[in-house]
Image: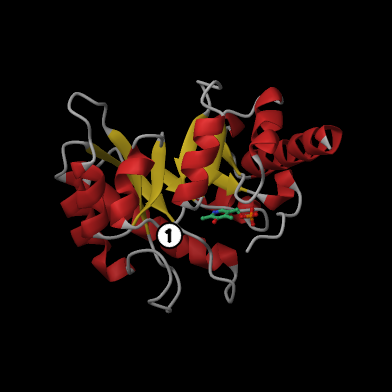
């Protein structure tokens, strides 16, 4: 298994570097986060042995359990990329290097309240909903400015930029173009919030062309996800 995993990781990293060069960008300016949801801690440990230091999870319980099981890998950075409930903010904050999915004021308040005295600030991205389905995760683009102002006022949170998932029913390049406009809105509030988390297994090349700084790649590296209930 590890030979295949290593081969896929090498191949995806080569494709990331190619896409970056085609876009006139330095591959070193792009962070590749491996999304390991539904896979066991052993797979994360195997990725670590291959040099991976950034991994992502989308459910709090799995995030907490896996990071605890792998706490000895102390320089592994855990990214939270999923929908979060306010009552899970404390558990997420205690482990996360970065939260990609802050999409409402209440959730930002919960992450802010969860700060331990003297703890460092938490890097957060504001997740934008690029679909017309309001049930999806992410703030509506028209509400992004107000959210950015709200989160920027929280001392224990540092707004670093935006995050989005490309809608299934649209060309990713077009959706990412709108995300770039959203990134500009956030920078009008927080000028150094330059990060854009976009690009998954199927669309990371388009995301790189648009200016993504953080890619969240799962199955193209990990292989198919195990069945889950
Ligand atoms: C699962 C997931 C990914 C990775 O998806 P792949 O298609 O497997 O690359 C990226 N971002 C989020 C928010 C996810 O939930």
Residue found at x 34% / y 39%: 93
Label 1 CB less than 8 angstroms from ligand 1? no
Count of numbered marks: 1
Q: Quadrant of the N terminus?
A: top right
In-image side of 203 versus 128 (left or right): right
In-image side of 110 versus 39 (left or right): left
Residue found at x 53% / y 67%: 174
**On screen, residue 6 above or below 81:** above
* Nearer to me, 201 or 95: 95
Residue found at x 75% / y 54%: 224
In-image side of 114 versus 217 (left or right): left
Q: Secondary structure at mark 1?
A: helix
Residue 42 percent location from the top left of the image:
69, 34
* Nearer to me, 210 or 151: 151
Q: Quadrant of the C terminus?
A: bottom right
Residue 83 picture quarter: bottom left
The residue to which callout 1 is attached is: 179
Residue 31 visible (yes or no): no
Disc 1: CA contacts within 10 A as few (<14), some (14-19) or many (>=20): many
Residue 52 visible (yes or no): yes
* Nearer to me, 124 or 15: 124
Colour mapping: secondary structure
Quarter of the image where ligand 1 sits = bottom right
Residue 92 percent location from the top left of the image:
38, 43
Residue 212 percent location from the top left of the image:
50, 47
**On screen, residue 45 above or below 188:** above
Residue 95 percent location from the top left of the image:
40, 34
């Amino acid at each position: 298994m590890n030979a295949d995993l290593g081969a896929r990781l090498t191949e995806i990293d080569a494709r990331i570097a190619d896409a970056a060069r085609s876009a006139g960008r330095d591959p070193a300016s792009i962070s590749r986060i491996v999304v390991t949801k539904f896979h066991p801690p052993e797979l994360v440990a195997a990725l670590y042995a291959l040099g991976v230091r950034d991994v992502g999870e989308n459910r709090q319980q799995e995030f907490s359990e896996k990071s605890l099981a792998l706490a000895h890998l102390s320089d592994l950075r855990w990214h939270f990329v999923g929908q979060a409930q306010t009552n899970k903010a404390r558990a997420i904050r205690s482990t996360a290097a970065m939260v990609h999915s802050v999409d409402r004021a209440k959730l930002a308040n919960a992450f802010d309240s969860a700060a331990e005295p003297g703890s460092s600030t938490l890097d957060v991205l504001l997740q934008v909903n690029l679909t017309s389905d309001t049930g999806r995760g992410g703030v509506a683009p028209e509400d992004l400015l107000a959210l950015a102002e709200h989160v920027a006022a929280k001392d224990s949170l540092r707004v670093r930029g935006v995050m989005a998932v490309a809608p299934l029913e649209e060309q990713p390049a077009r959706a990412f173009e709108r995300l770039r406009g959203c990134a500009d809105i956030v920078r009008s509030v927080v000028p150094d919030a330059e990060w854009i988390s976009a690009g998954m297994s199927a669309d990371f090349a388009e995301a790189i062309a648009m200016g993504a700084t953080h890619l969240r790649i799962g199955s193209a590296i990990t292989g198919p996800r195990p069945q889950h209930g």
